[in-house]
Amino acid sequence: MPNFCAAPNCTRKSTQSDLAFFRFPRDPERCRLWVENCRRADLEEKTPDQLNKHYRLCAKHFEPAMICKTSPYRTVLRDTAIPTIFDLTSHLSNPHSRHRKRIKVLTDEEVQKMKERRLEYSIEQLLGKKDTSQDGTEIIDAPQLTPHQRELREFLRSLFEVINLIGKQSLPLSFTSKDEQDGQPLVISTFQALLENRINAGDEFLRGKFEAAAVNEEYCPTTQQRQLLDICERCIREELLQEVREGPFFSLVTGELVEFPEGQHIPVFLRFVDQTNTLREEFIEFLSFEGEELSIVDKLESHVTKQWGLSMENCRGQAHAACGVLGIRMKAVTNQLLEKYPMAINTPCSTCALNIHLANSIPLTGVQDVMTVLKKADMFFKASPLLQVELDSAISILCQDNVEKGNGLKESCRETWTELHNVFDVAVDLLEPLLLCMDSVHDNEDLKWNDQITSDAYTISEALADFEFVVTLVVLKNALSFTRAFGKNLQGETLDVFFAASSLTAVLHSLHEVIDNIEVYHEFWFEEAVNLATAMEIPVRVPRLFLRKQQAVEPVEIQAESFFKEYLTIPVMEYITQEVKDIFSDNHLRALKCLSLVPAVMGQMKFNTSEEAHAEVFRSDLPQPDTLPAELHCWRIKWKHRGKEVTLPSTILETLQHSDVKFFPNVNSFLKILASLPVFKLGGDQGETGQKRLQAYLLDTPISHRSKSLAMLNINYHIKMNLDEMVECYIRSFPEDKTDLTNGSSEET
């Protein structure tokens, strides 16, 4: 909830201002002075605890010298600060205005006493020997440091520079070399090597610190390296979280499991709109993925509230990109979070096609095998351009009679075709060329390929040549054809997303029609699969594993068509239908329909939109909900009667950047909350940077060399590093560490 300033004639609130807001003090005497200077009679009846809990004053009511900025993200008041700057007369110019903060009228005697108290306070301030800078801001008297303490801080600063360099460049903490004399493997610390490099490059301070050290002495022990990494990670995370808190609304986005030496973790991103109205999705932390779903929910909730200092009550969306068993478990996590926080709307992620999201979440082994094989095939051809040439050759051979189709397939394969909305259509058309290409690579008659490539080709070929794979792929293609256009619109322009919300009823109607007539649809789909398998010389049969289990129980013959209808087509259709209903809940649809606030959508609808009915979903989040109907009316009138030279903003972010939106506080809040939902496009590549850097780190770093802290530094290297803040944080965090860090002496830090 936003903080409102308690001062009379002050309408500032925290959601519309970068100003700091301060609580009333609990000290009775000081609190009395705050209330007295505010001149609000209604506050005199309240206790200091009540005032401290419910009332705030913004920084505009304090002298600049009373405000201290202790860090880039922390502003505090001096312990003796008293507000003295108030506007007590502006309401008189408009006697008909509503004035809820009634100003107390003082007698001459009361005014005189107040002046005397202010004079006493001024004398105290003068005797306090405060130092102020030329611009009037207070300079905090820092404790005098001994020469050794100054040297230690300078040394720590150098260490943090090195550790940040290691993180940004994605270097391992150690690497293996060979001894020059006996050729034996030698493990070298990257940290040590970089420190020596700085010394050799002319860093006289470090040279002086280490010139008396033994040649083989480790400059910075492994334990301390981990401490430095931990401080870097904490400072970067705090810098990001401070921007999230200023929002204050956000969404949770998680990715696929990541393997580290200490176990499996899921990456957690936070999506939010910052104070510059820029939509961002930032990586925050790797969360250990151990235990049952309830344990994971508790762990995630604990991180959000206790470690990150956020409120789950401000979480407005969640998207969990996962497949297979992880997808099933994350769905359970999603449902438990929704039970606790109904406003944390479950949505698909904007970076993943809806059909792929649906297929990934289907809990059928055959479906998950298809998704895995498609990913393997995509990675296989990315390994070498020559493999792509081999696939193009196979496409040309099999598409001799339809050159246009062949060119289309080649074009799709040059993109990341496994991420397309029509991925299953492409995969069905590509199945024969894929099998032909894999067989050719595996045969390796020209000895062009190494053993690893031929082995991978054989593995993929065996999977493609299985009838269960063929029929599953065909069923997915046909079943998900009803959601393909809907999903594509969700990732399209804002107007497409708005109309997609209205088309969901038709999508669900089509899915139910298929279920009601499943016999007919399955017959056509199975026939298509049989024809494709026949063309590829794949025998039509029931899966071997099922037959073996069936024979052990009851040796009854079962037809392939009946088997796949019961164990594939019907479960797939029922799951897709239910999943679409679950994802696009009432709250989710109302949120999508709130896109009518975007001026381009309003224009397309001839300014006849009615947002009030949908706006209820976020009503409690608005700064002035009582004025919402009137504000929405003014918002429509503003754009309807715009000048001819004014172009209607077409996206949420474009609308937020428009200067006039600040005069519509409810609309402004609405748009920020909408933008933070994971279903909407991030806009360009800026928001996807964290996801791309994570994937790059995982591809470039072997599991044995991976570090959660180094990954945090590498992914967030765009965050400004405050080395001085890191040094102070280190000294505060490890006060018991009194080691010189250079020669083992026990001097005070």
Image: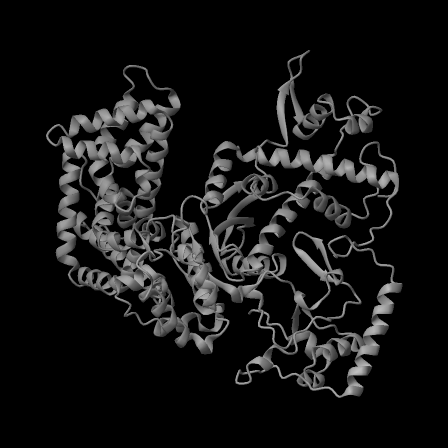
Q: Across the whole image, how many numbered discs are drawn on residues?
A: 0
Q: Which of 350 and 605 is in front in this view?
A: 605
Q: Is residue 649 visible?
A: yes
| Residue in the foreground of this view, choosing between 168 and 460 | 168
- In this rendered view, identify the residue nearer to me: 735 or 654: 654
Relative height, residue 644 to residue 443 (above, below): below
In the picture as drawn, the residue positioned furthest to the left comes out as 401
User: Which residue occupies the extreme front position in the image?
Assistant: 93
Q: Where is residue 544 in the image (x, y as percent from the top left)?
A: 27, 42
Split into 4 quadrants, where in the image is the N terminus? Answer: bottom right
- Percent from the top left, x then y, of residue 535? 14, 34
Which of the image's four quarters has the C terminus?
top right
Left or right side of 145 for 294:
left
Q: Which of 321 and 309 is in front in this view?
A: 309
**Residue under the point 16% across and 39% down:** 532
Residue 545 placed where, x, y %? 30, 44
Does 246 sit above or below residue 199?
below
The residue at the point 58 percent across, 43 percent down is 712
Q: Which colour scheme is used?
A: one colour
Q: On the rendered structure, is 460 left or right of 282? A: left
> Can residue 336 be spotted in the picture?
no
Rendering coords of residue 378 (x, y %):
34, 35
Q: Is residue 515 above or below residue 400?
A: below
